[in-house]
Image: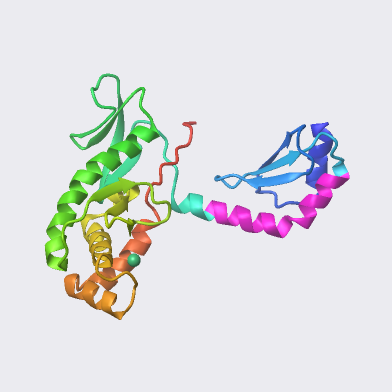
Amino acid sequence: MTDILDAAVERAGLPVHWSWRIEVRPRRRTLGLDVLPDGSIVIAVPRQTTPEDVTGVLRERRLWLAKAVRRREALAAEHPAKELVNGEGFTYLGRHYRLLLVDEQTAPVRLRGGWLRLRGDAGAADIVDWYRVRGRHWLIEKVRSWAGRVGVEPPEVLVRDLSTRWGLRTKDRSLAFHWASMQLSPDLLDLVVVHELIHLLVPRHDDEFRQRLLVALPEAVVLESKLHDEGRRVWMGAVRAAL
Ligand SMILES: [Zn+2]
């Protein structure tokens, strides 16, 4: 059956560089399209699908697919996935380190002698956790030293996954930072920290906010554009299998 469906997909005339696969899902009633994080397309078909259905739906939804593939590819390119193999590069506070897989080590992840050492049974989640725990210690100090200059009491500091944000103010006036921000260089983390500290005084990005930001950090505008640039390339935790 899938041979016939493959041919039906070919007839829909999708761009040749798109990768796709058909999955027969007996419990589905309608044909579904999904674009995976790497930009490949999954065509989920119910058992009774006809080749004409497949060709028809793909032709109909070509534009939607093109946009979805493009978006996924752009995101994947900007936030590259890592391979957990010796020599893979990781960044901490703007410095580059290489991954070294080790057999014996008490902690799953350690930074030592210029290497990010990963124990054999550990994985990406352990590296994320390492950024989170180590980052929190670092950020607590940073927040404390900036709080006085901004004119606020040092708040509680949390580090976690904030999706597309570097930092935010929680309802109970703690500051939360994205674990991935620990890859940024310290001057950019200053910007992130000062930005969030000022939010404890001024919730919106209005004139008063900008004033306070520039008084605390006169180079803020330059740093903002640098953050926009550097920020798009940080690792967000995705891994790909070694070839
Ligand atoms: Zn803000």
- In the picture, which quadrant includes the N terminus? top right
Q: In the figure, 100 relative to 61: above or below?
A: above
Image coordinates for residue 3, horizontal then vertical, percent: 81, 33
User: How many discs mark residues in the rendered view?
Assistant: 0
Displayed quadrant of residue 4: top right
Image coordinates for residue 151, horizontal then vertical, percent: 15, 67
Answer left or right for 92 relative to 124.
left
What span is in magenta?
52-73
Q: Is residue 76 magenta?
A: no
**For this rendering, which residue is in front, 133 or 147?**
147
**x 29%, y 49%: residue:** 183
Image coordinates for residue 192, horizontal then vertical, percent: 27, 60
Image coordinates for residue 236, horizontal then vertical, percent: 40, 46
Secondary structure that dominates the magenta span:
helix
**For this rendering, which residue is in front, 178 or 153?**
153
Q: Residue furthest top?
A: 104
**x 56%, y 56%: residue:** 71
Answer left or right for 110 relative to 239.
left
Ligand 1 in which quarter: bottom left
